[in-house]
Amino acid sequence: MQNQNTTSGPARFRMKARFRSFVFAARGLHLMVEREHNARVHLAAAAVAVAAGFLLHISASDWRWIVLAIAIVWLAEAFNTALEHLCDRVSPQFDATIGRVKDIAAGAVLVASIAAALIGLLTLVPPLLRAVS
């Protein structure tokens, strides 16, 4: 969003502008979930992790790990999606360098997803084993 302040100097804090920023951010997340298959997969995985956390009554400390893992995956996916859209706009035709950039960004999402899965297993499996034994 561009700064709409027409005077020189720093922009003034306005609640209306802050609210609009949240609306734009929410719209971006909605577009990502609506248009990106992997974002829907991440949303489902996050829902499963949160449901499992509630069902297993995990501790506040464990919740911190689950929330952090979900946030890191969503951050990686959002940056990857934004970068892909920018790359497609800048270079609609095939370009090997753009392809490598997109592959690297996708690799970051993969790393975040694997880390989140490991955090989920390390956090949720012990209470699950206690619950079923």
Image (cartoon, rainbow, N blue to C red):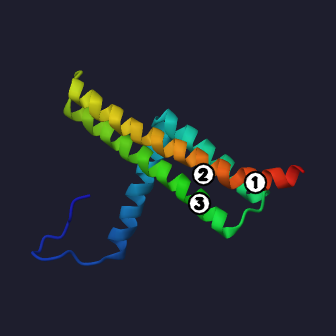
Q: Mark 1 packing: few (<14 Cα in 10 Å), some, or many (20+)?
A: few
Query: N-terminal of the two: label 3 or label 1?
Result: 3
Under circle 1, the secondary element is: helix
**Residue 8 sits above or below residue 84 on the image:** below
Residue 6 in percent (x, y) is at 13, 70
Query: N-terminal of the two: label 3 or label 2?
Result: 3
**Disc 2 marks which residue?**
119
Q: Is residue 92 visible?
A: no
**Disc 1 marks which residue?**
126
Under circle 2, the secondary element is: helix
Q: How many marks?
A: 3
Q: Is residue 116 visible?
A: yes
Q: Describe residue 129's horizontal placement relative to residue 48 as left or right.
A: right
From the viewer's side, name the closer residue of 89 and 120: 120
Give the Cα separation between the discs numbered 3 and 1. Answer: 14 Å
Residue 90 in percent (x, y) is at 20, 34
- Mark 3: amino acid: Trp
From the viewer's side, name the closer residue of 27 and 113: 113
Q: Mark 3 packing: few (<14 Cα in 10 Å), some, or many (20+)?
A: some
Q: Are marks 1 and 2 in contact (CB under 8 Å)?
A: no
Residue 12 figure quarter:
bottom left
Q: Residue at x 81, y 50 (%)?
A: 129
